Amino acid sequence: MANFRAGWAILHPDRAVFLIEEAMQRGISLGILVENSDSGIFRADPGTPDSARLIGPDGQVTALVDPFSTFMRQKAERLVDHLMTLFAEFPSVNSIFMNSEVEDRLKLCCTPAARRRHEKALGFPLSRLRTLDRSFLNGTAEPPACQPGVIPDDDPDYAFARYYFEHGDGWAHVNRIMAKACHRVRPDLITIADPFRLAPVPKRFAGMDTISSWTYTNPDPKSTLFVETLAAAARRLGNVPLPSITLWNYAGSLVPSGADRFARELTLRMGPDRWTECAWINLSRGVGGIGNYFGSPLEFYLSSGDGGDPVIYSPSTEPAIAAFHRDIAEPFGPLARTTANAPRRAAVLDCYASRIYGGAPRSHAHYTNYQIYNFYAVMNMAWIHADVLFEEDVLEDQLDNYRLLALPSCPVLTESVYRKIKAFAEKGGIVIADQCLQADIPNAVIFDFDFSFRRRVNANAMANGCDYSIKDDDNARHIVDKSQLKGLPAHRDQEIMETYAAELRQRLDGRFSRACDCSSPKILGNLRQSGDFSYLFAVNDARAYDDRSAPYQAMLEKGVPATATFTITGDWRKPVFRNLVTGQAVAARPLTKGTWSFDLTLPGGGGAIVAVAETTIAKPTGKVEAGPAAVVVHVTAPGSAGARPVQFNWNGRRATRILQNGAGTFSFPLAASEDTPDKITLTDLIFPDPA
């Protein structure tokens, strides 16, 4: 699905309807985009009463509307009502995307009424805070005194920061107003908002159907593992993770930017292999969908031979997106979504107290919510698959579910969280951390991993020996300060990360066991399960320079094939292993009781899904009901439990569907000119004997 802009559509409803109908004919669902340009929904348009204006912490009247004013509620509801009146009757208009990057520009409303509301919610006067006017891009330098690395639970600045993102700035409040107004008319409408980048506070997305954000992947596609943060928030909220791959590479990342860090003519679109790897990483986590972000300089049509510079537009990226959709997402996306991660024995804490009080070096990825992902990527290279936990999870005793807890970029803990982690360690839990940890955790294993070198892996640093101090943030456009940086080529970045992964593996061997493992740090993975079936997703991260990235060596963007040995442990007696992507059987060797080994070669930028199941599982059978407009097939496989992929072939068409617990009924509409098929072939993709 794609989006049309709400403001444009209200002014040109006939043209919007034409666009909707044209898209429907191509199988594209169009949604509505509530844009954020010029402060978006919060803009104080002509006619906004003075009483509804947002007064900032400095006492100045702003060009924004108080998010909690009656006028703001009426404005948001009026916009949605207008949109629903125009477009709700079209079933293919199935989403509303409330683009909320405007969060960076909002100020806390400080009218007298708003201040009273803040103080009532917080339980203390605002005068106790160091400042009301802060951006939350950087932590406060010095935490309050308590004990090393620990702050009191009632620390006012920490409490205020949580309140700000959960409710206080009004961003989430107004989005919930719009979501409720949409669902009153169209309960099926998917409500989307992003980004989730400045605070690991899941409640910011309460009331949304999805939790969404985009991820930059310079210099490493493994930054896409941020999908784990979206999944962690979705577990708490009950909504759907919807990660976006941004094809946008700012000037200075792959080629030098010159004097303008936002030079549009030097903003490059992502190459095909990097995009495919990012898509595979997201798919392997069972996401609800995969988004793609591109800006107007990167419009697809410009790369189709209409004069677009291939260095800028990477024309081969479009066919890669189409191929992944056709060959991977369409047949196997439902399988990924209807399975669950195998129970993980490791967790990583994204600690908000450490974001408020800083002390940890800022990640090359800039945004606060990415602070844990250098360390997290190293863990995945060592095949330690971990759930992301928030402070709320720790306080709810979820550490009881894990053997190992990682504390990356974690100089400060709240007292209650500290006590929970200390008790976990005293009961024998393994705690690992980097050198930022200050709290006294018994027997903590400390790794001296310095990731600051990753800021040097970019074309500006490689070509000019300097780079901008702030990057990849449109809302910090005014920051043009430069720092001296000696460039580091991308292949050295990968080598250093592999060295860290080897150290992590060596120091934890014998203490932490894995349900699945791989001989190569260049291959990522994730094990998902459903009933009688296990599915190992393997993703190839082996990369080299291509023609476009070679001159400045700032990105290994070309995927190369890789072969590795995998091991997997389960209670199978006589299992079958099959690569669902190729349809080929995988020759597995028994090692010890319950542990099997196999070799696998992955294509460049690609991946595999290896299904594991007992050979004794019953094969499915089908019964066909033919009608004038559709063919309905009832499938049964007695005695099997879980998600199981099967394929149907008829009249030259092919469709993959998922049996649940040995049964499924599937309807296949027939085109007006299509004859009822004489034969439908049913193939189990794990045991591919036609039936």
Image (tube, helix red, strand yellow):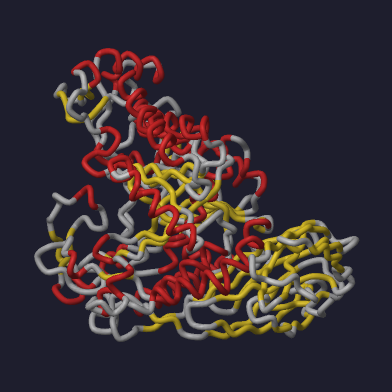
Residue 23 position (above or below residue 454): above
Spot occupied by residue 108 in the image (x, y as percentages of width and height): 27, 28
- In the rendered structure, the answer to whether residue 57 lies left or right of residue 204 reads left
Q: Nearer the viewer, residue 598 or 66?
A: 66
Residue at 19% in and 68% down: 485
Does residue 630 appear anywhere in the picture?
yes
Q: Is 49 on the left or on the right of 450, as rendered?
A: left
Vertical position of residue 618 compared to residue 51: above or below: below
> Depth check: 357 or 650 in front?
650
Q: Position of residue 339 (x, y in %)?
A: 68, 58
* Residue farthest left in this picture: 259
Picture coordinates of residue 606, whole percent (x, y): 52, 77
Residue 106 in which image quadrant: top left
Q: Is residue 400 above or below residue 78?
A: below
Q: How many marks?
A: 0
* Quadrant (top left/top right/bottom left/bottom right) for the C terminus: bottom right
Q: Is residue 160 visible?
A: no
650 sits left or right of 127 in the view? right
Residue 549 sits in which quadrant? bottom left
Horizontal and vertical percent for residue 29?
A: 48, 54
Question: Which residue is painted at 15% across and 65% down in the image?
Answer: 484
Left or right: 492, with 203 as reference point: left
| Image point (22%, 16%), residue name | 51
Viewer-proximal residue, 494 or 645? Answer: 645
> In the current view of this chain or complex, which residue is farthest to the front?
673
